[in-house]
Image: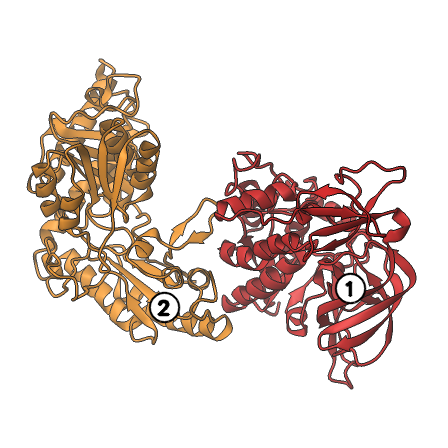
Chain colours: A orange, B red
């Protein structure tokens, strides 16, 4: 059976160039980067070279790049590494659980936490951050792109406000990296987190940008690795893979300004998918412009989004379907060869309604019946055609056999 | 080979449902596994003495979901966990709590079968392309084309292994549900099922059976009531009252009617020459009547919220055997309709501890005629 993978925001496959770049570092160049002899030096050279690539990717100094195990560690490090009892943290209700659960733990340990709610469009209003700021605010953490809706947050503006209040600013860029240009100087942030496997690199590796002088305590201790900011023998093949993925992403993003750029093509595919699915009655997009919101910030990034009032990354759309069970739709699509996600997987593997959509004000039924389509940058017209063939059929069947009238559940 | 129908197996992570999946997969059906996520075992942890870490072997524990998934992986069948926690709470847990608070003794398993397994799960299964569901219940369902003047009727029969028979919990099944359900274990004994599990190399073939109510990790329902109500921001209603004898003499006081079930002997807090049992719980006056063992026997009962399986409806008196609790030997009685959706039963011999909240299931030989809830 044909399979179409449309859950790039969950994870991505490695690009062939990434696999090739990593290949020598499993067996031939296996040395420990801390060793002084040649084998160690080869590994060290690979890590240093990768660091230089990441510095370019972030637009920062080499010394400001800290390799780690991925997005969860990067996010956790920002929260646990900067906050002490008595501090105040501002974050948003739509962050990844690597931020939210870390914040909850800190709240139990004497940190005051303010969760800023998004507008119905999915955007965080910078004025809300301004209102939440206090003299004791130590850290503000806001994501670049939301994993569920793809909505891009006005991080530059939020950063100005944060710095004006004398606080540190962390950006969870796990979902934004590779999809929009990253520039920590322009953003003005102190910390920024990325993960390799969301951008066609390997799982289990990521990096933080840590601005010089930012007093982040290391999460892991036990060696002087990464300038004492992250103990543990360097994951050399992973780091090399991350660097190659970052390099390829920079090429994609350079192209994006051009008419025939990779991300322009992807946005067109996504737009066609979205427009066609929206022809099914009882559907709509989550993460759209709500005209009533006064002074809603305009598109800050992604010029290919200029036709849309709310800036989104090119590959994502989140669509609600009235009168059906979202979990059953995900299963039905999987059995037809289409991989998409609905809500967030809870510990057992069942699906809970997305906290992001609930925070945007969707009721539980609609949040439960919302699907995220996130396209790989290798997606084709044929992939979209296939999904457009399968989705309406599945929706019709579900609505016929197992209709969920508003309010019947919960 | 002709294409066989797709069957969704309700997999709990236990031996029975795992063996069902293995049997059907080896018979050549297109099988998929569905596990219902019904209750978060950690939800009430730490409240009212409920342990922080739930023991294994209860439904919806992570261990059980893991076991179900491993079986599906071994069989190479698609497997999904379906979140039905809200519906379970609404249709099973809340009614369970309310029944106890009203002085009755509920059976959550029957509610779960009626509302979750054979309703929601069947709908989900059909909407994702399965024609039927299969479960690990010990029961037999057959279509008898001769019934109803040749229109035919689905009938439900006791399992071959009478010690494992679960028809008592299945009396609520409709014709539509019976038509779309397979009970592959109905003709097998438990030892045969374990042997099949071993034959198919299932790692959990020796896993012990679960006995308790799945969402009560401690097995202590009173602890659960207190913890659940506390979580909901509610308090136990004030139902303390008198313990009285059958002659109306006040023998003592009790702290709430939810502490009692008909036939209960322990925990009365009374000393007496002869053992005393709960005979009756009166929700309005909070009065609990106690008496000797012999006084527990009654000859009649009334049942409501009926469902009929082997007949379309009861129109006149009928001779049946009635089972009034899970571990009860069915007893001869005559049932007859006494009102809309209500029957009265008269037993040939008095029965011990007829308990409101339990179900009365009517049998004609091995066939389930129907059943209802004892009032």
* Secondary structure at numbered mark 2: strand
> In this figure, which residue is indicated by the disc labeled 2?
A321
Q: Is residue A402 visible?
A: yes
Q: Answer left or right for B81 relative to B239.
A: left
Residue B360 sits above or below residue B275 on the image? below
Query: Which percent across, then down, holds residue A194?
Result: 22, 39
Instruction: Tell which subunit mark 2 falls on.
Output: A
Q: Is the residue marked by circle 1 packed among few (<14), some (14-19), or many (20+) residues within 10 Å?
A: many
Whole-percent x and y of residue A22?
A: 27, 35
Q: Looking at the image, which residue is at 24% across and 20% down?
A: A225
With respect to residue A165, does A332 lie above or below?
below
For the residue pair B5 and B219, the one nearer the viewer reads as B219
**Nearer the observer, B116 or B262:** B262
Q: Chain of mark 1?
A: B
Residue visible at 34% across and 73% down in the picture: A282
- Which residue has dot 1 on it? B361
């Amino acid at each position: 059976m044909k399979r179409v993978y449309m859950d790039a925001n969950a994870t991505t496959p490695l690009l062939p160039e990434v696999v090739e770049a990593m290949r020598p570092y499993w067996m031939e160049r296996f040395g420990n980067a801390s060793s002084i002899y040649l084998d160690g030096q080869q590994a060290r050279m690979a890590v240093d070279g990768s660091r230089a690539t990441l510095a370019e990717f972030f637009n920062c100094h080499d010394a400001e790049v800290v390799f780690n195990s991925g997005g969860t560690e990067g996010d956790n490090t920002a929260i646990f590494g900067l906050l002490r009892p008595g501090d105040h943290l501002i974050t948003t209700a739509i962050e990844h659980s690597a931020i939210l659960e870390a914040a909850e733990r800190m709240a139990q340990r004497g940190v005051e936490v303010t969760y800023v709610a998004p507008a119905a469009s999915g955007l965080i209003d910078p004025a809300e951050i301004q209102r939440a700021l206090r003299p004791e605010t130590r850290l503000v953490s806001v994501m670049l792109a939301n994993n569920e809706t793809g909505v891009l947050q006005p991080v530059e503006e939020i950063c100005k406000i944060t710095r004006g209040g004398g606080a540190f600013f962390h950006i969870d860029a796990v979902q934004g990296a590779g999809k929009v240009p990253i520039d920590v100087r322009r953003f003005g942030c102190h910390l920024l987190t990325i993960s390799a496997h969301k951008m066609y690199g390997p799982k289990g590796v990521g990096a933080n940008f840590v601005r010089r002088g930012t007093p982040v305590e290391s999460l892991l201790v036990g060696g002087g690795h990464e300038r004492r900011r992250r103990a543990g023998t360097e994951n050399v093949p992973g780091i090399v893979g991350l660097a190659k993925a970052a390099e390829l992403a920079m090429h994609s993003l350079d192209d994006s300004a051009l008419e025939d750029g990779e991300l322009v093509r992807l946005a067109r595919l996504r737009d066609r998918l979205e427009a066609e699915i929206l022809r099914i009655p009882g559907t709509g997009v989550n993460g759209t412009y709500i005209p009533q919101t006064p002074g809603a910030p305009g598109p800050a990034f992604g010029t290919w989004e200029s036709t849309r009032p709310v800036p989104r990354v090119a590959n994502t759309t989140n669509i609600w379907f009235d009168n059906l069970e979202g979990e059953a739709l995900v299963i039905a699509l999987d059995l037809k060869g289409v991989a998409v996600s609905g809500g967030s997987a809870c510990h057992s593997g069942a699906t809970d309604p997305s906290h992001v959509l609930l925070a945007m004000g969707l009721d539980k039924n609609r949040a439960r019946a919302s699907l995220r389509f996130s396209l790989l940058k290798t997606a084709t017209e044929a992939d979209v055609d296939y999904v457009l063939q399968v989705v309406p059929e599945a929706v019709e069947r579900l609505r016929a056999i197992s209709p969920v009238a508003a309010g019947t559940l919960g | 080979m002709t294409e066989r129908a797709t069957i969704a197996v309700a997999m709990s992570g236990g031996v029975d449902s795992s063996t069902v999946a293995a049997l059907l997969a080896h018979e050549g059906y297109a099988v998929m596994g569905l596990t219902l996520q019904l209750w978060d075992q950690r939800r009430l942890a730490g409240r009212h003495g409920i342990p922080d870490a739930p023991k294994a072997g209860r439904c919806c524990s992570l261990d059980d979901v893991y076991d179900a998934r491993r079986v599906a992986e071994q069989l190479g069948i698609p497997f999904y966990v379906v979140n039905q926690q809200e519906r379970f709470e609404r249709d099973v847990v809340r009614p369970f709590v309310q029944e106890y608070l009203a002085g009755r003794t509920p059976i959550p398993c029957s509610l779960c079968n009626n509302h979750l397994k054979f309703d929601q799960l069947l709908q989900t299964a059909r909407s994702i392309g399965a024609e039927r569901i299969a479960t690990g219940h010990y029961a037999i369902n057959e279509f008898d084309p001769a019934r109803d003047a040749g229109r035919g009727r689905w009938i439900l029969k006791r399992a071959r292994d009478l010690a494992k028979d679960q028809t008592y919990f299945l009396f609520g099944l409709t014709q539509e549900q019976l038509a779309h359900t397979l009970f592959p274990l109905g003709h097998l004994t438990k030892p045969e099922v374990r042997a099949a599990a071993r034959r198919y190399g299932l790692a959990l073939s020796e896993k012990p059976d679960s006995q308790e109510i799945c969402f009560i990790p401690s097995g202590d329902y009173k602890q659960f009531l207190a913890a659940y109500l506390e979580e909901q921001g509610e308090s136990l209603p004030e139902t303390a009252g008198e313990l009285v004898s059958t002659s109306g003499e006040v023998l003592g006081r009790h702290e709430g009617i939810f502490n009692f079930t008909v036939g209960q002997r322990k925990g009365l807090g009374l000393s007496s020459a002869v053992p005393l049992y709960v005979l009756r719980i009166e929700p309005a006056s909070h009065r609990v009547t106690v008496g000797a063992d012999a006084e527990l026997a009654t000859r009649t009962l009334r049942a409501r919220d009926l469902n009929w399986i082997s007949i379309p409806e009861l129109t006149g008196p009928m001779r049946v055997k009635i089972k009034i609790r899970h571990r009860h030997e069915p007893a001869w009685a005559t049932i007859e309709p006494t009102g809309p959706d209500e029957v009265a039963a008269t037993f040939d011999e008095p029965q011990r501890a007829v308990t409101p909240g339990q179900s009365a299931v009517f049998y004609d030989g091995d066939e389930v005629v129907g059943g209802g809830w004892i009032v």
